[in-house]
Image: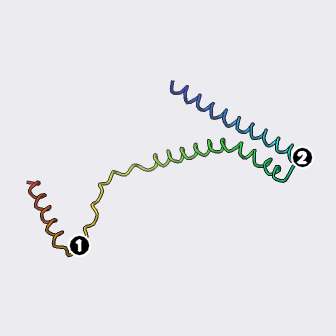
Amino acid sequence: MRGDRAMARRWLIVATCVVSLLGACALAWWQWNRYESASGTWQNLGYVLQWPLFGLFPAFMVWRVKRLKERQAEQVRAEPAPPPRRPQPPPVAHEDDDELAAYNRYLAELNAKDAT
């Protein structure tokens, strides 16, 4: 069942890429006709060159995502996961504050009582 979904998804991606390319080629043809007409401009010629690139973009993204996933899988296989590290407490600021020192002594006493 899962393999059928994956295959259907692949065909849908391929169909989307093909439809995108065909649509972009049709738009490029339309821009070429506009360029050759009496009211055509250089901008139309620029679009003639751009539309096929727009049509190829979905296929490029599929290829790129596949390459990134393969590279990530290679890195996972090559490097074992490091053991989880315990977070370290932030460094204690040494200030000349009597109230803070008294509070820290109080906390140390509570910790000592709790440990016994």
**Against 27, is 43 above or below?**
below
State which quadrant residue 12 falls in: top right
Please count the marks in the image: 2
Under mark 1, the amino acid is His
**CA–CA distance in space, label 2 to label 1:** 80 Å
Task: Decide: few, some or many residues near mark 1? Use Cα within 10 Å; few <14, some 14-19, many ≥20.
Answer: few
State which quadrant residue 100 falls in: bottom left
**Against 28, is 104 above or below?**
below
Q: Residue at x 46, y 49 (%)?
A: 78
Q: Residue at x 61, y 46 (%)?
A: 64
**Against 13, is 56 above or below?**
below
Say whether disc 2 or disc 1 marks the residue closer to the N-terminus: 2
Q: Where does residue 18 sit, x and y in percent of width and height?
A: 70, 35
Q: Residue at x 67, y 45 (%)?
A: 57
State which quadrant residue 108 falls in: bottom left
Disc sitting over residue 94 in the figure: 1
